[in-house]
Image (cartoon, rainbow, N blue to C red):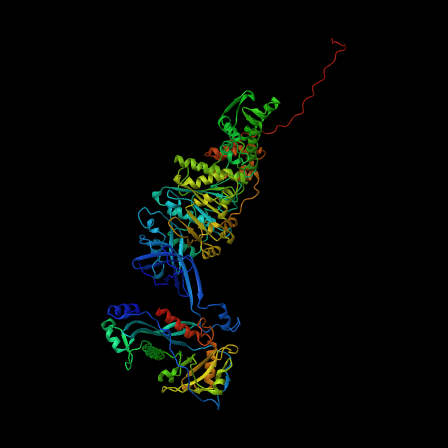
Amino acid sequence: MLPDQIRRALTLHGLTPATWIPDASGGREVEATIRVARVVEGPALGWHPVGLATSWTEPLAFLDGVQRSEIVPYAGAAPIVVARIAAAVRERRDRTLSTVLETSRTLVIARPSALARAGEALAGLDTLALPEDHPPHPVRDLVDARRALDRARGALEIGLGERYRETGDGWLIVDGSLAESPRWAADPRMIGIAKSHATLPFEGDDLERYLRLPHGQRSSLFEPQTRSLAPVRSWALRLWPWEGRDLLYGLVRIEVAPVNGSPDAADRLSRFLLAERAPVSAPDLCWDRLLYGISAVEQYLRARLV
Amino acid sequence: MIALRPIGRVVATELKPSTPHQFYFWTARDTPVGIGAIVRVEEAGRVVFGVVTDAVAYSDMMTPMHAVLGADGDPGAMDDPTRRAEIRLFSASVLRQMPEEPLQPVPIGPVRLASDDDVRLALRMDAYTGRDRATGIPVGVYAAGGLESPVYLDCDFLLGPEAAHLNITGVSGLATKTSAVEFLLTSIFQTFPVHKGSVAAVCFNVKGPDLCFLDQPAVLSDEERRLYARLGLTPTPFTDVHYYAPFKSDGVNLNTLRSHEALAANTRPLVWGLREVLDYAEVLLNRDDVDAKADAFIDFLGERVVGRDYRDDTLRTKPFNVQTFADLEEFFRAIFDFVEAMGKGGEVWRTHHVATIRKVRNRLSNISTRSKGLVTDDGTASDLPWGGFADRNVYVVDVAGLDPLAQDLVFARAVSRLREHLERRDLGVDHVVVFVDELNKYASADGSDTYVRKMLLDLSERGRYLGLVLFSAQQFRSQVHRRVVGNAGTAIYGRMDMDELATPGYATLSPATKIKLATLPKGELMIRHPHFTQPIFVKFPRPPVMTSREGLDRFPPATGLSFPDAVARQLRTFDRHISTDGVHALVEGRAEPDVLRALAATRRERPADPFAFFSACLGRRVTPEALTTRRPVPSIRHADGDYGS
């Protein structure tokens, strides 16, 4: 059922219609923080040239997910959010991407009391209940809804990624952290690429060194501090020269399973990833950090979600 | 009907909406769709057929700068590991909607390549093929994506009466124009429906050996034979072809490249006398000459003088009997003698000014001089079989060796005679296709208003009611009078010159269609036909007749035949047993005009024994008699005295 249909149904049910699409409806929100990581290569954080870009010779796939949400009615002061989440895996063969797996869900997110007021108008739809430990507040409820949606989308991506890995032996690059899932974190054929630097792994001089990583080099391997129980190995890689632009320009953080956490593996994978800079994913604003394969999955999903 | 797998999907945006006449669709990267492909869209009970007229492709790259960045500025860098998302977006013009009412925008739905049945429906061929009294004429096969469908023209719209005429445009030397006409005539002759009556063709060979070997078979490839089979045609040359060519100035060798003896049996002379020329004297007059006075005098000659006894005691007491150009010259000479004798005040003879008389005389004597082989001085004509045309016969008039004025005369007279006979319904056939190449010469857009051009205009505007159909060809359509090409119900385009395509006449074609036309391979054509709402591309096999090059190799023209040999060759067309030696012996020592006269009489009479007749016409040989020495006349014996005895 489309949001408009749900809106009409709920309006007929006596709820107050709304048409607001929240600012951050398209992606996750992350708080800026520092979680100091443990360097596992050498005594201190260093820079390591990775060599020339090398084409990836093995089958390769990309996984990403998208979300879209809007408030359709209000039950009193409590918003009812209708969200659509989707994830897909696009596999590259002969330089051409094709979608091999995809899934999507429509979710109605609200306080249980608000869902109850909607009654049978939501029959057949998946619902996600928000905590009701405080009085309804349209803005705070919306923040809660967004977090719930992020979790739901993450779960969708994890499920799809695991399905893909069960079906073949190809490498899978995911947009974000592998530490979201213990199975991902242990998978020897998965790579997580974090282009958001809201959570930084160092502070002080190390942070400065980390952010000034030269083009074509990687940082020393480190073990990120994570809230999950899935340990991973990580390093930073500078895809494009940053000088004269921004410290974060072209900087990505790579995550792999510990089994791939050797310096040689990091160099090899980094060379592969340098080759993935082309084609550039412009006009995306993050094209300096966003691999084209990930961008292609996102474009595909957004085209499907419209 | 088997539904083929979709190869595309209609897209419609605010900037590129679907309309009742146009739509857009995208396809996979490796699509079989190309410019000219016919596609079918079916959605919600509505079926739309369209023909692809243009295409664009682009990727998700916003600016070329991103390509430079991705390659680090190195054009030789390795290929991107991932190929960019890319679209193949085609625009198509609607051929037909079913149902046709209410006419609506093309629905957004899956797009399939057209099957055989789809092509039949899309081109509205269902109205005239596959039913009783069908009128379809195969013109080629439409081919796309491994599918091949025969395309038919409606003979009601090709040979009348609904519409008629065909015009072909294409650059020279790519086997477009002549080959297409030869193939289409083959198709017409083999498939013209019985209920439509009979059909013949008159082809004017205006250059080289183009149409000289229509009765000789071509060597066709298996693929070409397969195409013939697909079209339901048999790849055989024309069985009944009759060639007509004027003589060279010697009056006995034919002025044609089809002069090999093996081809002589159906190659006849085209010879006209004074009467034939005088009836079309207007052709010989240029724009400056055309005035009422010249017309009046020519009418006077035609009605009062030529072919009858004309008495004018002021000229001479004996009546004139003008049958030939020589007689006419004698008549003119008498007039000029008369006016000269009159002295001052004698500029007029029977209300005709002497200057007008001189002008007409000059024009008429000019044609008899410049086209000596076409115009005979002795009044014996050899002409097309007016009234005796036969079904599925081709009559080729070879005027390639004539000067332009004589070509005009031949063309004007032949077409006028066809028209007269068709009006009277006594030509022998119901429909005649007249094929004229180099139309830009005979009906040019910006040339003078000649008799031939007026006649072509008349033919193209009114010929279809009579069954007189013009198949015309030229290299540059833009240079032909637009009423002539505009009246052609069917137009065929071969490979075109880009300069020609840039002229306003092609403004309705998309840039992609123009590019396709400019690079069209041999054997492919674009066709406009009244039933087709958009131009259609088709392939056609080589015609089943020998090409001019092959023909000249196999049947090299007989050049430089001696007078007796040429006479023998002519006589053998009546009786192939006549020997060259016999003719040599017969004509040796004879005056050439006498021999030509005898030959003309033989041709006219077509006797059972041509050699005997020819010999009789020559008459007894007058053997020279040796002069004997005469006995001198004895001198007169004188008398002694002054007065005799």
Report the side of A147 relative to B243 (left or right): left
Check the image and name the residue furthest to the bottom: A43
Locate residue B315 relative to residue A189 in the image: left or right.
right
* Vertical placement of residue A36 versus A140, above or below: below
Q: Quadrant of residue B328?
A: top right
Residue B630 is left or right of residue B389, and the answer is: right
Question: Which residue lies at the image location 52% right of the left edge and 48% below the top edge?
Answer: B552
| Image spot of residue B201 (x, y percent) | 43, 43
Q: Position of residue B489 (x, y in %)?
A: 41, 46
| Furthest residue in direction right, as rendered | B641
- Counting labels gives 0
User: In this orientation, which residue lies closer to the viewer: B303 or B635?
Assistant: B303
As drawn, the residue found furthest toward the left would be A120
Residue A104 in the image: x percent, y percent? 32, 73
Decide if residue A256 is in sight here: yes
Task: Give the side of residue A49 with respect to residue A84, left or right.
Answer: right
The quadrant of the picture occupied by the C terminus of chain B is top right
**Residue B546 in view, yes or no:** no
B109 lies above or below B319: below
Which residue appears at 45% of the width and 48% of the height? B182
The image shows residue B159, relative to residue A174, as above or below, that is above
Residue B405 in percent (x, y) is at: 54, 38
Based on the displayed image, in which of its 4 quarters is residue B241 positioned? top left
Tell me the quadrant of the picture where the N terminus of chain B can be found. bottom left
Q: Give the vertical position of B66 relative to B221 (above or below).
A: below
Nearer to me, B79 or A8: A8
Q: Nearer the viewer, residue B21 or B592?
A: B21
